[in-house]
Image (cartoon, coloured by chain):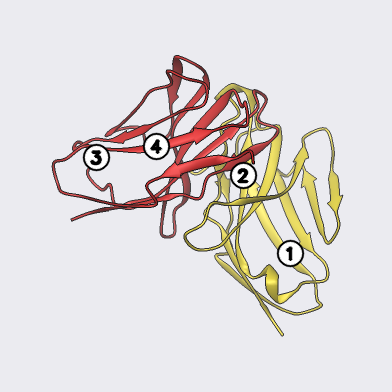
Chain colours: A yellow, B red
Amino acid sequence: DQQVKQNSPSLSVQEGRISILNCDYTNSMFDYFLWYKKYPAEGPTFLISISSIKDKNEDGRFTVFLNKSAKHLSLHIVPSQPGDSAVYFCAASGANSGYALNFGKGTSLLVTP
Amino acid sequence: DGGITQSPKYLFRKEGQNVTLSCEQNLNHDAMYWYRQDPGQGLRLIYYSQIVNDFQKGDIAEGYSVSREKKESFPLTVTSAQKNPTAFYLCASSDRNGNTIYFGEGSWLTVV
C-alpha cells in the first residue's frame, strides 16, 4: 500500500508563476520528508527537505511546507522557470524503517514560457 | 570527487539468467539502498543496508538478492525468479540517520 501519495500526475504552470506540488502520507512514524527532482534516465537529485519538528523550510526559490496534523506537505517553486520542468518526487522516511525513503509516484511539472 | 557509481548503465539479460548490478560509493556512508522505477510507479524500495554485513528487505524484495561485504559496495542480483525484471534501477546511499541521501545515475535492465 502506498504510504506516500502524490495525487496529481502532472502540472502545467506559466513561467514566473508559482508551482505548488502536493504530497500526502499515511505513516505517522515518518519524521523526515524530502523532495527530489528527476529527469528521464537519470538518478533523482535532492531539492529540499524538512524535519517533522519544523513546518516550513526555504531554500531560494523552493519552499517546503509541512502540516503534520493533516499528514500533508507541499513544495512551492517561486518564480517557476522552464528549467524546472521535470518529475518531482516526494519522499518520507522514519527511524522505524532504517530511514529508507518511501516515494510517491511523482508529479510531472511543465513550466511554459 | 565523492559520489555513487552504478554499473553497467545498460544491461540486457536473457530470460532465466541472473544478473548483478554494481553500486559503489566513496562518501563514507553507512546506509545503502536499492530502488526500482517503473512507469507510473515512482520508486519502490527493493533492499536496504544500514551497516556492513547486514541488510533488510524492502517492499519488493522477491526475486532479488544483495550483499554488503564492504561499506563501499552494495551489489544487487536480479535472479531468474524475478518475474518482471525490466526496469530502471537506482542505488542510493546516506549517512546513518538518512539526512543526506544521494542517488546514482541508474541502470537500465532489459530482459530479452
Question: How much space separates mark 2 and mark 4, taking CA atoms?
Answer: 24 Å
- The amino acid type, in three-letter code, at marker 1 is Ile
Sequence-wise, which precedes: disc 4 or disc 3? 4
- Chain to which mark 3 belongs: B
Residue A10 in picture, x, y percent from top left: 58, 69
Residue found at the far top of this picture? B53
Residue where numbered disc 2 is placed: A91
Q: Position of residue B69 (x, y in %)?
A: 42, 18
Q: Are marks 1 and 2 on the same chain?
A: yes
Query: Is residue A99 something one can see in this rendering?
Result: yes
Badge 1 element: strand
Question: Which is nearer the eye, A72 or A93?
Answer: A93
Q: Residue at image x 64%, y 48%?
A: A24
The residue carrying pointer 4 sits among few (fewer than 14), some (14 to 19) or many (20 or more) residues within 10 Å by Cα, namely: some
Q: Which mark is residue B82?
A: 3
Crowding around mark 3 (Cα neighbors within 10 Å: few <14, some 14 to 19, many 20+) is some
| Mark 2 residue type | Ala
Left or right, A57 with respect to B16, comes to right
Label 4 SS: strand
The relative height of residue B87 versus residue A40 in the rendered view (above or below) is above
Outermost residue, bottom side: A113
Mark toward the viewer: 3 or 1: 3
Q: Residue at x 18, y 38 (%)?
A: B80
Query: Which residue matches tag 1?
Result: A20
Q: Amino acid at mark 4?
A: Ser
Identify the residue position indicated by label 4 in the image: B22
Q: Chain of mark 1?
A: A
Q: Name the chain under label 4.
A: B
Which of discs 3 and 2 lies nearer the camera? The answer is: 3
Query: In this rendering, is residue B96 above or below B8?
Result: above
- Where residue B100 sits, quadrant-wise, is top right
